[in-house]
Amino acid sequence: MKTKNKIYIIFLGAPGSGKGTQADMLGEYLNIPVISPGELLRHEIETKSLLGRSIKKKLSKGQLVANDIVEKIIDKRISKKDTQNGFILDGYPRRLKQASLLKDRLKKITSQNSVLVIDIIIRDKVIKERVTGRRVCDCGATYHLVNNPPKKKDVCDLCGLKLYQRDDDKHNVIADRLKHFHARVRKINKYLEKYYKIVKINGELSIKDTKNEIIKIVKNEIE
Ligand code: AMP
């Protein structure tokens, strides 16, 4: 779908809530880029850049990377030409400071009513089941041992590489990430709702039903 107006969407939701999957599908639907600091940081690690080597430990433990690093990669990505009709943020802001920097940044490029916050709500119990079963491939494909298994055990359907579990998807790490997420999310929500419309989406539905809910809401906003 081509949008006449610019739209800026911020996805909130716990790690493992499915926000990455939904953000990618919505990005494709609206034809605007998805900006995910997690993806950008993992790319730095994969290419073994200086930055990648310095943040590897943080990512494997599921801890947040320093603000100055995140701000730099976000600024660099936002300044690319493909963001001219808007963008979707997946995994940013994750700190109150990031929320306030984002508000300042958006103020320079758009009006408040072109921004929509989508908050995906899901219980921790469901997240733990989902995340610990997730298997990924270096080509970007994602599987789930129960809900979306590869045709051949531990092998990527798309490229044949061996699948693996992200360190930060391991049980003790996800429990820790959720604890920190809950400690921060309320403040971020409270901050963002002062400026933007926030819609809550049930993330425990199937991927398709969640997607349809999101598209219905977004269509309403842009028409
Ligand atoms: P994600 O792919 O969104 O699950 O993020 C993976 C990891 O990247 C997180 O556990 C953090 O280590 C780092 N990260 C992602 N987004 C942020 C952010 N907004 N601020 C700081 N660190 C982040």
Image (tube, grey):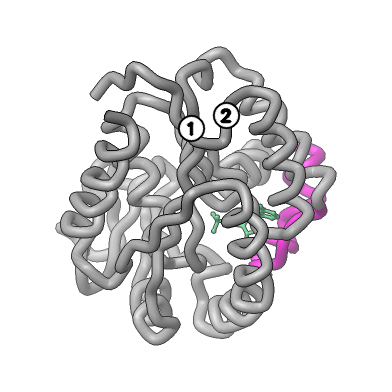
Amino acid type for the residue under numbered disc 1: Ser
Query: Which residue does the image show at 19% across and 64% down from the upper left?
Result: 206
SS class, disc 1: helix
Q: Residue furthest top?
A: 81
Name the residue beneath numbered marker 2.
111
- Image quadrant occupied by the C terminus: top left
Q: Is residue 161 left or right of residue 77?
A: left
Is residue 50 inside the magenta stretch?
Answer: yes
- Disc 2 residue type? Ser
Give the image quadrant in which the ligand numbered 1 is located. bottom right
Residue beneath the point at 41% across and 72% down = 131
Tell me which segment is drawn in magenta.
49-66
Comparing 215 with 17, the one in front is 215
- Quarter of the image holding residue 140? top left
Mark sitting on residue 114: 1
Q: Quadrant of residue 148?
A: bottom left
The crowding category of the residue bearing disc 2, from other C-alpha atoms within 10 Å (few below 14, some 14 to 19, many at least 20), is few
- Relative to 149, is 162 on the left or the right? right
In this picture, is 69 found above or below 180? above
> Relative to 77, is 208 above or below?
below
Q: Quadrant of the N terminus?
A: top left
| SS for callout 2 | loop
